[in-house]
Amino acid sequence: MSRIGHLILFSFVYAIYRLITHEWVPQVDVELTKEEKAGLPGKRWKPGTPFPKDFIPCYDPGTLEMLGPDMPADTADQVRVKIERARIAQKKWAKSSFKQRRLLIKTIQRFVLENQDTICKVSARDSGKPLVDAAFGEVIVTLEKCKWLIKEGEKWLKPEKRSSGLMMFYKNARVEYHPVGVMGAIVPWNYPFHNVFNPLLANVFAGNALVVKVSEYASWSSLYYGRAIKACLAAVGAPEDLVQIVHGYGEAGNALVTGGTDKVVFVGSTGVGRAVMKAAADTLTPVVLELGGKDPFIVLEDASLSQCVPMALRGAFQSCGQNCAGAERFYVHEKIHDEFVKRVMKAANQLRQGWALSPGVDCGAMCMPNQAAYVQSLVDDAVAKGAVVECGGAIDKDAPGQFYPPTVLTNVTHAMKIMKEEVFGPVLSIVKIRSDDEAVALANECDFGLGSNVFGSRRRALKVGAQLNAGMTTINDFCATYMAQSLPFGGVKESGFDRFAGIEGLRGCCNVKSVVVDGIPGIRTDIPPPLQYPVQHCAFPFCKALCHMFFGLNILENARGLFMLVSAMMIPTPKVLLKGGKTD
Ligand SMILES: *[C@@H]1O[C@H](CO)[C@@H](O)[C@H](O)[C@H]1NC(C)=O
């Protein structure tokens, strides 16, 4: 048979094998209710209305239409009840096998695959982002995470052998990964689906329960997502209380941190992150803080513009810039600066902004009520200090929702606030650089250090990337580290500390427990007789000799230690030892 013939035969056999070994995965059907589909016709959110204390208003930021009745905000007591329910469920779930946990992840994967439309539409209405932005940030990354956990999750949570040290050469040392118990998560509004499913997947796989507080700016979608979670849990026989969703404000968030969770992941602003850490100090609840970012996007003089310009646009305008790892500072080498700007403008001028669900929309709305005004203040400050507005730059007063237009600024410098504060809006700010060193210096001149992106020839870009003080660096791509779900996500400086996602994030869901056990059958450990209580007179010389024997820097030293050991044991025991330390 020819080589091609072999290949076809092999593929055929492999396909049959995959079909036969395919595991049945439950299908979960969850629909939007009639009320959720209809919303509250004719009712609109009045911009500028303060949020009530006990209720959370739900509206579409692109049309200001009310999506449903105000949701009750959880009180501290209600949050504590949810934590308690989760704890009871976790006790059962902790005993589940990895096989069971994988089936749960596969069930979720199937649900996501088959319900992409509804998942993305619900996210679009709640957070204002168009369907393609939802496909990127809600669905694809969630599916990658499912796939990674199914493939590698168990491998990274199995007990791991470690070296047992010189004196205990005959023992086995290992690390075991036990679930921490009830994980708390406080997540932001920018990706209402993924931000819930990201901690959910890792924690249920690790054997934890999860109590997750969603943002008051995107609570409506969690009704549908929450029903889907319960249905997936039920479909595989997992306790339905394993995942609890909390709605509310600061009081609910505080109760989540102090109300009995075993660990908390906070994703949000640096200011609130500080408050979370302070609250967690009282109960010594460990916290993972994933705070803001202000990622640099460096274009070296030998970068390929046809490759990096579309990435620059996606980096700045994906989800209208409302990303923790969004590109916010563009450093472009002077030799290609003008061409870069020209190409960016060609696309930027054609961007269509509007309601997330109207056809052909590139950019949606701002999710937070006051965000557009905040972005405007940063743009105004930049313009006052010499920035040039190439497009956008002003709120359209007649827009039907919370919009800020896609904006490109050139002639930007570090004297402007827009290079210091997190924008979280659709602004592509370009700074001209003269050398790689200048790019590194400017990129590092920032309070944040989350992601970073460098474009250029491979070696040169890697060299620049290695000098960036950030938690993540992508070379010749934008934020691609998050597509490799084996990699941790997190930052340095004011971007927070510790990591979620990846091996580190998965193990972060665990109590990392050290275990030592005898390694050779028949050999057990006894304290050497001279060291047993009451210690013998030779005990200290015996210890000294052991140190020489084991830790001597050459074999003569080791031999000397052995000789010392024998001599020590021959030291005669004096008759009586008095408290004062003198022999009688
Ligand atoms: C760029 O900014 C500088 C100040 O930083 C200003 O003097 C200059 O006029 C600006 N250039 C343009 C083209 O506006």
Image (cartoon, rainbow, N blue to C red):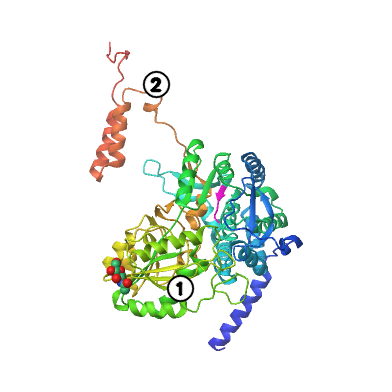
Element marked by disc 1: helix
Which residue, as the protein is rendered here, is positioned at the far bottom? 2
Looking at the rendering, which quadrant does residue 366 occupy? bottom right
Q: CA distance from mark 2 to mark 1?
A: 75 Å
Which residue is labeled 1 in the image?
Answer: 313
Which residue is labeled 2 in the image?
Answer: 534
Q: Are marks 2 and 1 in contact (CB under 8 Å)?
A: no
Looking at the rendering, which quadrant does residue 152 occupy? bottom right
Local packing at callout 1 (Cα closer than 10 Å; few below 14, some 14-19, many 20+) is: many
What amino acid does circle 2 point to? Pro
Residue 209 has which mark? none
Give, as a single range, the part of the protein colored magenta.
184-188
Element marked by disc 2: loop
Tell me the quarter of the image containing the N terminus. bottom right
Work out whether residue 327 or residue 163 is closer to the camera in this orientation and state it.
Answer: 327
* Residue 421 on image: x %, y %: 40, 57
* Residue 538 on image: x %, y %: 31, 25
